Image (tube, helix red, strand yellow):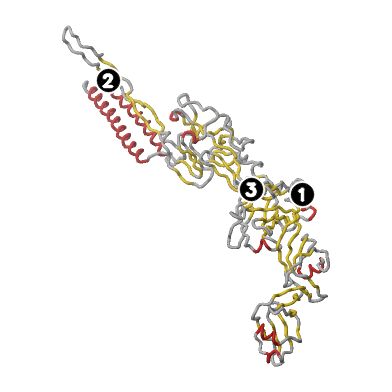
Amino acid sequence: MMRSLFSGVAGLRTHQTKMDVIGNNIANVNTTGYKSQSVTFRDLMYQTTQSASGANAETGLGGINARQIGLGVTTGAINTAIAQQGSAQTTNNPFDIMISGDNFFVVSNGSENLFTRDGSFYIDGAGNLAMTSTGYTVMGWPVDEETGEPKPDTVTALQIMNDSVMRYDPEGTSEARVTGIVDRNDKNVHSSSGRIMNFEFYDNAGYLYTAKFSVHATNSNGEYYIALDDIKDSTGASLGDEILSKVEFGATMEVETAIPYTLVNGTAEAQGTLTFADGSTQPINQAVTTIPTQLLQDEYGIDPAVSATFTEIRFEEDGGVSIKQPTSASPSYYPPVNEPTLTVTTVVVTPANGTAVNLTPGVTAVPGNPPLDRDGLLALYNLDIVAEQVKEIEVHNDGSITVTKKDVNKAASLRFNPGTGKFVSIAGSGQGLITLGLANANGQSFNNINMDFSTCSNVNNNGSSTISSSKGTSTGLGAGRPEGEMISIAVDQSGVITAAYDNGMSRCLGQIATAAFANPSGLEKVGDNLYTATNNSGEFDGTGKDVTEGGGKMQSGVLEMSNVDLSQEFTEMITTQRGFQANSRIITVSDTMLEELTNLKR
């Protein structure tokens, strides 16, 4: 009976231990990263009252089993459900991180490395990533200065916020690409100002500038030229002739053009003759007082009675005739029956104020020879032949002129295949590259910029050119940038911490390392959601692992909650309670039996 008493006591103690574990699980039902525990029992020991004996073949007796009396129960093991993932709680805090998988965060208290599944972190006053609950620093891998990527090595505290990473240094533009269409039917490319193409770029201090280019057509199909007209700063002010003179782009080109200029001051009148089928002639744009009435009847079908009473007759450039009579307020116009031949000998240009200038149509003139002087052309046509470096001008019957040849500074030929419209060359380079030479323009402020024209084309686009420029290559290299200020930090699935800046750049700040153990259940809990390695868990090698190596990942803005299952815990609580009650009955019944024994001696 004494043995049963001690068995009952052992049962009570063991079930109390299980109840303690269940209570701890329930208490930590909302603890971040908590892993639930469970208890298993084992029988304690046995008293053998008779050993087993084997069968005797000679006597024919059979064997007898051993007789053993159990002496109770004890705790077999307290297991931790370390591999069971807890549920996810979204916090939207970028430094709340959940590990999916069996790995652990590595943290340091300053003297040793500890391990946790609690990913609730923050940035402390020194810029270190640390646990919010204990302040222990999160360990990881710093950035290799040469590659800009994390370098797996002995884990160190991750200092992700310091003066060196709060800003991103500016960089001057070194690459550019020009894309789009040059449409030969675009009126802009045939104008004096050309099709304007602006190109923005940064200097080495991060200041923004705009280079103004213009695209012009020549007289040859598929052949154009692009000229650098000006460079302006971010306020719109030009850098000035002194700096522009040091900028290199293309060369000085003699180009054949067809740029029209019309009168902006004064009127133009053509003078010459009309030659009729019978060989007779009449002057144009002049008042005629005597004329054969037969000519008017034969060539214009005018009744001689009408022509006999005229006060003025004027032959027009189109071959028609205007007749003014005393009874009419304005002349009457008569078209020719047969088209006469027009010969224009002179165009008289009369400014609003000044002396008339006689020009010869169809003749190519060189500026500087009277009467095509600089002042006259500037006044009449708003054409500055010196500034525009004009070399040839053609005069037309209507008084308009066309610049047919001129020199252009800082210009490069842009050629396309006239049959297919595909790019051929820029400044003779079939690779499509030309350098905008800025390095010597303003000290060390600028970089030379390689401009790539190879993707331009010369095809129909309904009379609209779309040629444009962009900073950097197609992959964004060499675009340049202003100085950037940090605006956000993010953690990716592999634990790499990346800072984003308001200039569009990003920078790696380090990577959170993790620890993996051969037997994670063998880790020892030390409180504060922390574990330490034991002889049965496996050792931490000091370097750690990328969480993705074992198929795991990190989720930013999410915390791993406790994996305690309340339904399971309450069920275990019921069975534990019943076991405790049953063991208490062992004691009470054994006590009653002892009482009966002592009552025998009354």
How far, Cα to Cα, is label 1 from label 3? 21 Å
Can I make out residue 232 in this image?
no
Give the left or right position of residue 41, taking residue 208 as reference. Answer: left
Pick out the residue farthest to the left. Answer: 60
| Front of the two marks 2 and 3 | 3
Locate residue 559, reporting x and y percent.
48, 42
Mark with earlier residue (1, 3)? 1
Q: Which mark is residue 529?
A: none
Locate residue 402, reporting x and y percent.
73, 65
Where does label 2 land, which residue? 69
Mark with earlier residue (2, 3)? 2
Where does label 3 land, which residue? 472
Can I make out residue 333 in this image?
yes
How busy is the neighbourhood of tag 1: few (under 14 within 10 Å), some, or many (20 plus)? some
Mark with earlier residue (2, 1)? 2
How busy is the neighbourhood of tag 2: few (under 14 within 10 Å), some, or many (20 plus)? few
Q: Which mark is residue 441?
A: 1
**Labels 1 and 3 touching (C-beta < 8 A):** no
Viewer-nearest residue: 145 or 299: 299
Viewer-nearest residue: 372 or 550: 372
Tell me the residue at 56%/41% (across/down): 497
SS for tag 2?
A: strand
Q: Amino acid at mark 1?
A: Ala
Give the left or right position of residue 281, taking residue 524 as reference. Answer: right
Locate residue 129, reporting x and y percent.
57, 39
Q: Amino acid at mark 2?
A: Ile
The N terminus appears in which quarter of the rendering?
Answer: top left
How far, Cα to Cα, is label 2 from label 3? 87 Å
141 vs 288: above or below = above
Q: Amino acid at mark 3?
A: Gly
